Image (cartoon, rainbow, N blue to C red):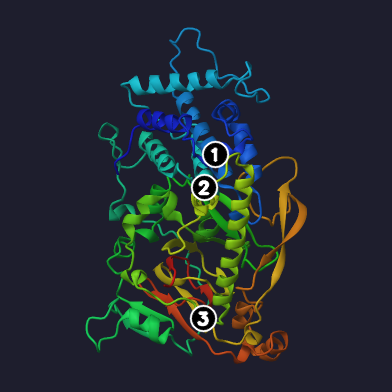
Amino acid sequence: MRYLHLHHCIPKSLLEILNIRPDDPILRCFPDNNLDTLHDHLLGDPDGAIKLADSKLRVFPFKDVDVCWRRYYTDACLLKACLTVAEQSGFPRRERNGLPPLPPCPSPAPPSHPGSTAPARRQYILNIIEDLSSTKELIVADPDAEWLTPTIHMLDKAMIMTGGPQRDHLIKELITALQGACPATKGNNQSEQEFRDDLDPDELATPLFSDDAAPTPEIQFPIPRVSNIPPWSTSRSSPNFRDHTRDKKTPLVITDAVNDWPAISTGSWASREFWMHRTFGGRRLVPVEIGRSYTDEDWGQRLMSFKEFVEKYLDRDRHRDDDDAGPTGYLAQHDLFLHMSTLYKDIMHPDYIHIDAPKAEPGTPAFIRLQREEEERRRKRGQEVIRVREQEQEPNHGDDDDTDSTSWHEPDDDGPHLNIWMGPSWTISPLHFDTYHNIYVQVVGEKYFRLYSPHTPLSQIHPKGKEPVVRRRPEGGEDHHQYTQHHQDYRQEEPELVDMSNTSQVDVAAIEMSPAEADYWEELWPGFMDAEYVETVLKPGDMLYIPIGWWHYVRSLKGGIGVSFWWNGW
């Protein structure tokens, strides 16, 4: 893999942070929208900036966080990381006579105030940029250095917590440069600015997952299976995927369509060595769901290193000392490709996700939910237009859409949205529906899927309603690795109502494991036992199409990895 050396990518990142565009939403973080005020806060005290931005990010729901704080958190993390690497590598050079240390940050002063420290802080950073740009020596990073892993974690948190708006390419470059600067990186050739993406087959010796497995159910109502169906019509009479989505509108298992994916054909994704190499020796952070199901009281989420995730949850038999399996850990519904983009070379986008699949059918829960979300977006957009115009001194003669601040951070609703699902056996996704069409590909392991039509009466499905979710804060300081609302060390705040109507109250896993208690389940959830469903078991290379709005329950039978592609109907 080609990469920039540290003495190239650090100056590049620092210059981007210094040269903020006038229309950058980060300027909205402080009342006067002034660059010097921003730099007074950001440049001299990156740690304080991270803490401030972190407090602003803890708004519920997260999608309502102003993008200015996502930008501020991202730049603070990137700045702190760049300064750490530079200073630990001896920059700025000590031969600069009388060079002062980075000035401490007092209480911020207005930019016109003589006490403003922004110019001195900018000059300090410019000295680092000049010295790094002029050096002819390659920077070597000690893989055992105490600062290395915290720096990687800081950059990963910026990507996971905010998506790295406007800075994702810089964050990826810096992490890759750090990996390239470590002599221990396999196949590293610093002079050629390159290290190996992949390992040889004989280096992929250790399985990623333990051998434990969950019971495989007997399939009674199988989903139809077809072999590599063409996406579009090749003749009037030949079956094709587009016609299936528009005419039958039912789930479909497609086989033999992804066998050429390197992730499958090489078996690399089943190897521990592969993932340790791709995650910088297991240092990279990932968000892990802790608990059986997100509907359970003790469910939570936590950021942890990939190595910890493997040792605690994926390869439990090898690392635990007793018979207590503990809670399940699941890397679920996460776009790992976003901050580990080398994973893209292991897969390919199926052509199926480019067909013009139909929208949710009128009257179905997905249709109603999408209507409600669109109404809420329009309401908030109108409020934002009013708020911006009230703050402007001059009247706005432009297009109303130009005032929509969400344009900086809202994802492309048409997709496709990629997610990775990685976990041991017994991970569970409770019965729910999504407002996207979904192509799910099983890469490693096996999973059981059960699906119910969106036309199933809600009296049989028993959907949840609005439920209180409690946000909690850490007692005695922030724990930046913990970002769940369910954690015993967090003090309780006021509950917020969350729309959970896309999730059923029914515990399908409990019914699966105790079918003999049908009378009890019927009493608990009347009508559900009579609801019609279809089901399948996916194995490596199998692909499942889940139409928009179909209720689905998922249980992993073996430790495994899947990739989902969500896209909107037309």
Q: Nearer the viewer, mark 1 or mark 2?
A: 2
The CA span between labels 3 and 2 is 53 Å
Tell me which amino acid carries mark 3: Arg
Q: Nearer the viewer, residue 195 or 492?
A: 492
**97 or 365: nearer the eye?**
365
Vertical position of residue 146 compared to residue 425: above or below: above
Residue 184 quadrant: top left
Q: Earlier in the sequence, mark 3 or mark 2?
A: 2
Q: Which residue is mark 3?
A: 450
CA distance separating discs 3 and 1: 45 Å
Dot 3, how many residues are within 10 Å of its Cα: few (below 14), some (14-19), or many (20+)? many
Query: Which amino acid lies under the numbered mark 1 shown in the image of this protein?
Result: Ile
Kindly report the distance in space between the C-alpha atoms of the residues bearing marks 1 and 2: 24 Å
Front of the two marks 3 and 2: 2
Which residue occupies 35% across, 78% down? 254
State the residue at coordinates (29%, 69%): 259
The residue labelled by disc 2 is 397
Task: Give the amino acid at mark 2.
Answer: His
